[in-house]
Amino acid sequence: MKKLSVVLALAWTFILSPAAFADEKRDMTLNDIAKISYVTSVSTSPNGKWIAYTKSVQRTPYKDKDGRAWSELHISDTKGNSKPFITGEINISSVSWSADSNTIYYLAKRNDDKHPSLYGIPVDGGESTKIYSHVTPIGGYDISKDGKQLVILATDKDPKFKKDLAEKGFKAKVYEEELKFNKALLVDLTAENKVAVPLDTKGHVQQIAFNDNGSGFVAKVSKTPLIDDIYMASKVVVLDSAGQTVSELNVDGKVGHGYWMPNGKSVAYIGVDDVHNPKEGIVKFHSSAKSEAVDLQPGLMGHTMAMDILPKGDVLAVNHIGTGSEVVIIDPKKPGKSSKLKTGDKIVRAVSTPVEGRGFAFIADAPNHPREAFWYERGRMTRLTNSNPWLDDVKLARQESITWKAEDGTEIQGVLTYPLNFEKGKRYPLINFIHGGPEAHMSNGWNMRYSEPVHVAAAKGYFTLAPNYRGSTGRGVAFSKADQHAYADPEFRDIVAGKDYLVEKGMVDPKKVGITGGSYGGFATAWSATALSEHYQAAVMFVGISNQLSKFGTTDIPNEMHLVHARAWPWEDYNWMLERSPIFHAQKHRTPLLIMHGEEDTRVHTSQSLEMYRYLKTLDNAPVRLVLYPGEGHGNRKVGAQMDYSMRLMRWMDHFLVNGETEAPEHDLEHQNKLKKPKEEQQDSNGNHEAHGGDCCSAQL
């Protein structure tokens, strides 16, 4: 009996050992994509003690009503003691703090609200209180330091006769002329009857913030609400207390939000050096409203992606360099000099500073976790959130940054994810995931999303490569301009060079290579499936460009296309635009191509996919399929469309690269077999839950 007990004890020891649990980890699946939660914003309290953050929580496919992910409000102290404040079926946005750090403000549509209103909730617990509701949605706001004044951004309400006419069938729309401008309106919060009084602002106000001394505002204003003007005709402006413009600060071109310095006179923002710079990424500083701009990081071989202002007036900047990131502190009095902070291998995305203290909050991700909230103080970094504890039970593939040389010797960088059970000396299929923009880049962080399921692909035995081809950000302004008036070649040959590099190293099977991407990445995919078809055996094009000429005529960003991409109008270089269009090379099509597009896309019109499909379907040189998503635009936002997209993407790749098929798979995914009856849940009348205590945030923590 004693011998049997020993044997059983040993057995239990093995079963409970960490090694045994490691063996029980499972592969990532497509179903996991809809389970991923992540932190979307952080806001540090003025006293530096608390961090309010919003968390994206996905709906459950086949169970929940279709829609976008929910956005919850949580709060943490600086040690990571976190508590949910408002959760469930809710969309929280624009979180900020009262000057005394006692109240968290936010925008949300709650209870009987017809549109988002401004609410406040005590940090030590209690119910939310509606601060102000406007006749139209509040698009942004700021509250003065003394808490007495509120400035909001909102459009005018439509006259009643417009609805009456629509009911009678008078619904004609005048394209790009019936514009709704955001106006800045001032509200006296001390008044019993709160009335919004318009400020004398000009143009479309996108962002506005009080000066600490109450003498005026800094704002971001565009000429019109048209997306092209928001991109290319926005200004950071200093306004007086009446809303009149004192000065315009930035040069023409792309620009971020403006930030007041503690002295109430100086302003900083992320801008560009000229109108042809494709992406704002330079920290600009004005010592006064009338002074010239100073570049605080001249010659930066990267892009500044986020910033905030520290209590003493230094700039805290997040720079993305190559596939990594850095956080630096810059004294505006000493441009060109900075102190780099230790943030390890994290890819930092956003920062939030307090009014007092030495620390700050930030959002970061890494190869092994999505975006989470962190606290940094005195050289120490503390992770505040773990939004996906279930990931501890999932196998994640090896991921690393790699560099290769293009045909002309230019060094190209990218992020490579290995097959989960990689064996050296064995060749594997490859999927290239191509980012859009092209003024964007892939970092060596968490790259798993519905359109780029890298860990699902790894579990299936694929290499995946996310190349930062020329035209990408993260390597300085010159590199980001390298594709201007050079569509497709050499930028898409940079991708081929990455594939060839992996083939030469004996890692990839050259007969099993796929490519996919959205927007400009969709253009890359369409080009690769036609002009470069000999290199690819499967392709999935998403919201992509097929005809540069008709794309210009149907896009909502014609000036942006001209100024930072084509650098020519169609009537100036018609043949060049035609020859840089995938349809021009349609007869070369030999790569099975799956095309997917949102029916409501205004950026790259759905007709781009219709053109591509019709050309290739008529030629019939290789399989082609077109899938359209009703209610989706330039990218899928709702859970059902995202799930469908992921499934179709991976099935197409498996079908042609792994199974070696030559005809398209069945068009139906048989979603009906996964339908479930929703379970009843105990929720309040608005479908969300609100915390009533502040246990996470007591002073002794």
Image (spheres, rainbow, N blue to C red):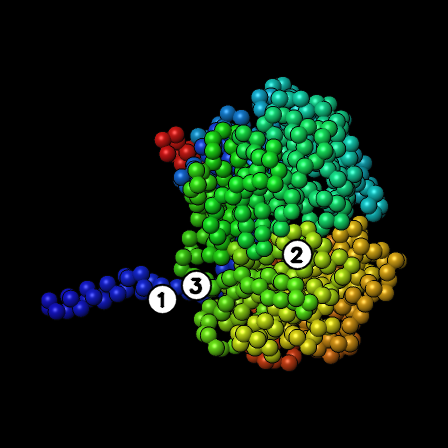
* Left or right of 618 on screen, residue 317: left
Q: Which-is-in-front pick, marks 1 and 2?
A: 2
Closer-to-camera residue (608/131): 608
Identified by mark 2, the residue type is Ser
> Seen from this angle, which residue lies furthest left?
2
Residue 22 location (% of width, % of height) = 36, 63
Residue at disc 3, secondary structure: loop
Q: CA distance from mark 1 to mark 2?
A: 39 Å
Of callouts 1 and 2, which one flags the residue occurring earlier in the amino acid sequence?
Answer: 1
In the picture, the quarter occupied by the C terminus is top left
Q: Quadrant of residue 433?
A: bottom right
Can I make out residue 688 in this image? no
Residue 396 location (% of width, % of height) = 45, 62
Q: CA distance from mark 3 to mark 2?
A: 30 Å
Identified by mark 1, the residue type is Asp
Please give the residue where the numbered disc 3 appears in the rendered image. Answer: 395
Tell me if mark 2 has few (under 14), some (14-19) or many (20+) residues whose alpha carbon lies within 10 angstroms of its own: many
Please give the residue where the numbered disc 2 appears in the rendered image. Answer: 472
Can I make out residue 375 in this image? yes
Residue at disc 1, secondary structure: helix
Q: CA distance from mark 1 to mark 3?
A: 10 Å
Closer-to-camera residue (107/556): 556
Question: Image point 72% across, 24% down: which residue?
Answer: 240
Residue 566 location (% of width, % of height) = 79, 57
Q: Quadrant of residue 511?
A: bottom right
Residue 466 location (% of width, % of height) = 59, 62
Please give the residue where the numbered disc 1 appears in the rendered image. Answer: 23
Of callouts 1 and 3, which one flags the residue occurring earlier in the amino acid sequence?
Answer: 1
In the picture, the quarter occupied by the N terminus is bottom left
Of callouts 3 and 2, which one flags the residue occurring earlier in the amino acid sequence?
Answer: 3
Closer-to-camera residue (87/567): 567
Closer-to-camera residue (193/296): 296
